[in-house]
Structures are given as structure tokens and as C-alpha cells.
Amino acid sequence: MANGTHKEGFWRRVLWATLPLLVWIVHFAFSYGLAAAQCSPVGMRPGGPDRLVLAASTLGAFALCALLAWRACHVLGGQDGAAGLADRVALLLAVLALIAIAWGGLPLLLVGGCA
């Protein structure tokens, strides 16, 4: 096995394991950035942040992390107990990201307007 092939496999496993957290980070930055921009004096919207866009981004991120969790479960179930560390970490981080997206998205959807 060539040295470059080994490195590609390593980075692919690292990306696979951390992808749920990357989804959460993008969702968090987009949601709170949008809310802050739409509640600033320059971009003030009547009625507060656009709840439809926030709900769509939250549901999209939640669905993507649920898909990643399902895929990790499928990979773990198909290996007859010989799952690698990256596969186990991917499942754990996908569940953690699901909780974080739900927790972070809930206040955005419940806020009635800009204070």
C-alpha cells in the first residue's frame, strides 16, 4: 500500500467520524447568524427572524444527522462486532449532534421577535 493511499483512508475516516459535528456547526452558525442579522438595526424585520428559514435549516440539519446516525448503525451492524473506532465515534457524534441541533434550534423557533 502506498503512503498516499494510507493517508487518504485516514482523512476519509476522520471526516466520516466528524461529519455530524460539522453539520451542527454549520447549522448553529447559519441559524444564529441569520437571527442576529435580522434583529440588527440595519436588517430589522417586522416580527423577528424568519421562522420558516430557521425551521427549514433546523429540520434539514436534523435529517442529515439522523441519516448519518442511521448509516453508522448500519455500518456497525454489518461488521459482526468488528467495528472500527471511527465507526463508533461517528455514531456517538451523530447522536450528540442530533441533541445539539434540537437544543440549539428550539429557542430560535420559540422566540417571538427581536427584543
Image (tube, rainbow, N blue to C red):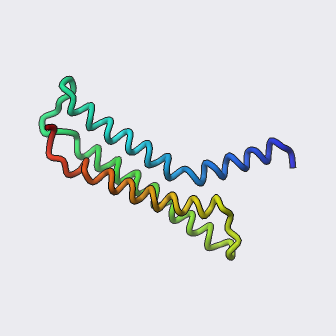
Image spot of residue 80 (x, y percent): 69, 76
Residue 104 place in picture, x, y as percent: 33, 51
Please state which of residues 51 and 97 is positioned toward the viewer in this rendering. 97
- Specify the farthest residue to the bottom: 80
For image coordinates 17% across by 29% down, the residue present is 44
The residue under the point 54% across, 63% down is 91
Vertical order, 34 against 10 (above or below): above
Which residue does the image show at 21% across and 27% down from the upper left? Answer: 43
Which residue is most to the top?
42
Q: Residue at x 31, y 51 (%)?
A: 105
Which residue is nearer to you in this view: 63 or 48?
A: 48
Residue 66: image quadrant is bottom left
Q: How many marks?
A: 0
Instruction: Please determine whether, in this image, residue 46 is positioned above or below residue 101.
Output: above
Q: Is residue 110 left or right of residue 53?
A: left
Quadrant that contains the C terminus: top left
Q: Nearer the viewer, residue 18 or 51?
A: 18
Left/right of residue 43 with respect to residue 87 in the rendered view = left
x%, y% of residue 70? Answer: 51, 65
Left or right of 30? Residue 82 is right
Percent coordinates x, y for residue 63 in the rendering:
42, 57
